[in-house]
Image (tube, coloured by chain):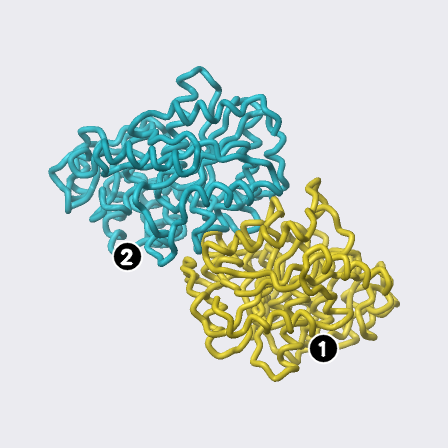
Chain colours: A yellow, B cyan
Amino acid sequence: MYYSQSAPLAIYAEGEFGKGHSKTAEGVIRYGRNPVVAVIDSTEAGKTVEQAAGVPGNIPIVASVADALQYKPSALLIGVAWTGGRLPEQWRADIKLAIENGLDIINGLHDFLSDDPEIAGLAAARQRRLLDVRRPPEGLPVGAGKARDVPALVCLTVGSDCSVGKMTVSLELTRAAIGRGLRARFIATGQTGIMIDGAGIAIDRVIGDFMAGATERMVVEAGYDHDLIFVEGQGSLIHPGFSGVTLAILHGSCPQAMILCHKANKTTIGDLPFPIPPLSELVPIYEQAARPVRQSRVVGVAINTFGLDEQAARRAIADAGEDTGLPAADPVRFGAGKLLDSVLALRGKAS
Amino acid sequence: MYYSQSAPLAIYAEGEFGKGHSKTAEGVIRYGRNPVVAVIDSTEAGKTVEQAAGVPGNIPIVASVADALQYKPSALLIGVAWTGGRLPEQWRADIKLAIENGLDIINGLHDFLSDDPEIAGLAAARQRRLLDVRRPPEGLPVGAGKARDVPALVCLTVGSDCSVGKMTVSLELTRAAIGRGLRARFIATGQTGIMIDGAGIAIDRVIGDFMAGATERMVVEAGYDHDLIFVEGQGSLIHPGFSGVTLAILHGSCPQAMILCHKANKTTIGDLPFPIPPLSELVPIYEQAARPVRQSRVVGVAINTFGLDEQAARRAIADAGEDTGLPAADPVRFGAGKLLDSVLALRGKAS
């Protein structure tokens, strides 16, 4: 565990909470083990997280790091992700203020705070910790398909795009499986997942040659004493920027089962001029990409219906089920049981 | 250009020249612009490179760094690649001896010599340069499919496995196209290609999120003042360890044309228990993987027939052509014209 899971956190999401770049903040509030005592975003100050972003809970949003101190956080968690993940200059002053007021910093950006001489020097002087959760461990192996051999059933979430809910679906499936008494484990492959689970490797930050090997190592480590492994997928095989990370995780984790994740009504990749094809075309793209390393089946579709009214949500889910012929659900809104049933139906079958 | 292309080189390939891990050494001898004055491998000392490995030329193989000095090299080039690419401890003494004798070091391993305090300190004291060609540049972008827009025709080599000849085929096609008066450019994506061409980015050493963007940047930089771009592919979409790098290069370079490369009689991936499927099954794997970003066609098959007699070589090529229904050739042995014709047939067609 990279940080005490009872330590109270303040989450920094200046200008972004609930606006599309704050999925780290929202994920940590929704699924993390640490108590979150405040969110910092001057543009939403005075609201609760539920009022600002629909994330359940009464956590207050405050205007500044100074205002958050009254809630006695142990650490400031950088809760905003940017494409490319680099540290905006203007956040520097706020991070320094937090350190000066005795807070550790939990950072998931590509830019490591411990490599920043000014911030690292200040943290050392104040004896505060800088936790760069995206920093990969040393000595990662080259992938060799060893995850095929673990006795656990491995399920990977894959997607039509980034930010459609792959991590969330993996977490909901893990919870549901544990609720049924199964030995289930979530494997984090991105910065938010690591912050939530307290362990994992941010595969998008690993050097190309070792991405599959890093994934493989995590699956092999967990795969002999669990019944079920839910690996958090990243990116999409059809994303022009991130597809390499996606395929490395697919071949590194060797899943028997995949859950295809999609955000209702999203029609293009990221903000790029690339259309998302029908889900029925995405299913064979993933199954064919997996096959040379391990036969794998998409066994369900998870539809992120956030922002739709209930009728529209149920229609979007039904449409996805009809298009693919697969069980479909929004596990956050309506429960993960149906998708978990479909994963478990593979148990005992020859892979 | 990372190094003067008239500087004479000694190539370090201790224990490995011609034995399967020395493709960097052989590639630099065969295609590099710098004169190579000696190869160091005590197990083959006294032979020429042609006698030891079938690489054309009378370059002598010597037993030690000390023996190579008589040929007045300016630099020692590390000519051996290992899986994972880390520096064996025992080479350290030889590298230090070279620096002490006034040589620069050209290194393509994952371990950077300039990050090694002992070697970096010695090089600084002796005013010698350490050229870590695999070190990626700063500030790489996230890929956004921009290589689709360049006017040049882009051709990527893809493969059934690593080390089947993708770089060589790209170089032979570039040479053949220049020979026909076309403005053709080779784009290096690996350490050997960079050593040969004097430019490029080792994509397998780039952080996952930026692999496609790094490839894209190189294609966009060259794509507006060339007719043809030949991008060196890496790995294989069916390799459990390296497939992510392969897909990032495919989506980063947005080729209209692909040449599928294979080594005759190779039946498994690397030294792993994964079978290489028939080439006719690999063709759709690559075309389907490319499609969401850019429609791309495998327009020919390059068969590496090294080690086969002429009759067996011609049979292997004919078999590949028959299996795939595509033009097939060994461009090193029998010329690249046939494959180049097939690439050029795409010019002017809608992509």
Q: How many numbered dots are placed on residues in this image?
A: 2
Q: Quadrant of residue B274?
A: bottom left
Q: Is disc 2 placed on a helix, strand or loop?
A: loop
Give the answer, above or below, for where A272 lies relative to A18: above
Residue B350 % position (x, y): 62, 26
Q: Quadrant of residue A80?
A: bottom right
**Residue A121: in sight, yes or no?**
no
Give the answer, above or below, for where B15 lies relative to A335: above
Q: Residue extending furthest top? A: B181
- Look at label 2 and name its amino acid: Glu
Question: What label does residue A35 carry, if any?
Answer: 1
Q: Residue visible at 83% across and 75% down?
A: A58
Say yes or no: labels 2 and 1 on the same chain: no
Q: Quadrant of residue A12?
A: bottom right
Label 2 CA crowd tier, 10 Å (few <14, some 14–19, many 20+): few
Q: Residue visible at 51% across and 61% down?
A: A136
